[in-house]
Amino acid sequence: MAPQVAYLGRAGQAELLPGDAGYDITPTGTANSGIATGIELTVGLQPGAGVGTGTGLKAQYWTNTTFSGTPALTRTDASLNFAWRTKGSPATSIPVDNFSARWTGNVQAQFTGPHTFVVVSDETVKVWINGQVVIDHSTPHTAAVDSATVNLVTGTKYTIRVDYTEHTGEAYLKLLWFNPNRRQRIIPTSQLYPAA
């Protein structure tokens, strides 16, 4: 929903147009004060679907970087917000280096419209939404930020899959999102549902 705006101290209103970083506000009418002009800005946010009832995503961890064999660990991770750095790992059964992880399940939208998914990763990452690859940074890299924008519908659940590998050195994996109605944040547990 676009903001509504009016200028106080002017005979007219204001023109509101989408700009590079939000909206551009241009006054109309004749100024009736040469000293100051006040702005009255009313913003109505799109109603959301409320908080979901999710518990996180299904997590599978391997002790290799090729997702080979039976996972060494399977559990539900409440969110994807990991900073293992150089000495940590997902669990004692998983080595500090040379492991892989896959998270699967559903993500539920709280708003209708564009949602930008943001991944912070070190060393490789690939993300699917509803079976479509939206982020693919499969070349080993140091800490990097990748993003993709997908249109979602309020209350709808979309399949999600995130593949991650850690080779050596620092290890990070974070999954965030934002949309015009909500600032960037880690996707909350309530909007994530583990695969069966």
Image (cartoon, rainbow, N blue to C red):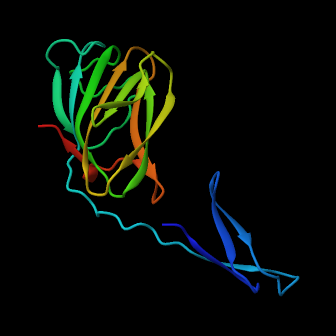
The residue lying furthest to the left in this view is: 196
Write the residue at 47% across / 36% down. Answer: 147
Residue 195 % position (x, y): 16, 37
Q: Is residue 155 above or below residue 14?
A: above
Residue 101 left/right relative to 58 = right
Toward the viewer: 107 or 99?
A: 107
Q: Is residue 146 above or below residue 14?
A: above
Quadrant of the frame with the C terminus: top left
Residue 41 in which image quadrant: bottom right
Residue 196 left/right relative to 8 = left
Residue 103 % position (x, y): 25, 32
Disc count in the image?
Answer: 0
Residue 29 % position (x, y): 77, 80
Residue 71 left/right relative to 27 = left
Residue 39 in which image quadrant: bottom right
Q: Is residue 24 above or below residue 97?
A: below
Residue 16 in which image quadrant: bottom right
Write the residue at 23% across / 44% down. Answer: 56
Toward the viewer: 138 or 4?
A: 4
Write the residue at 51% across / 21% down. Answer: 142
Residue 20 % position (x, y): 65, 51
Toward the viewer: 17 or 137?
A: 17
Write the residue at 74% across / 73% down. Answer: 27
Residue 21 left/right relative to 143 = right
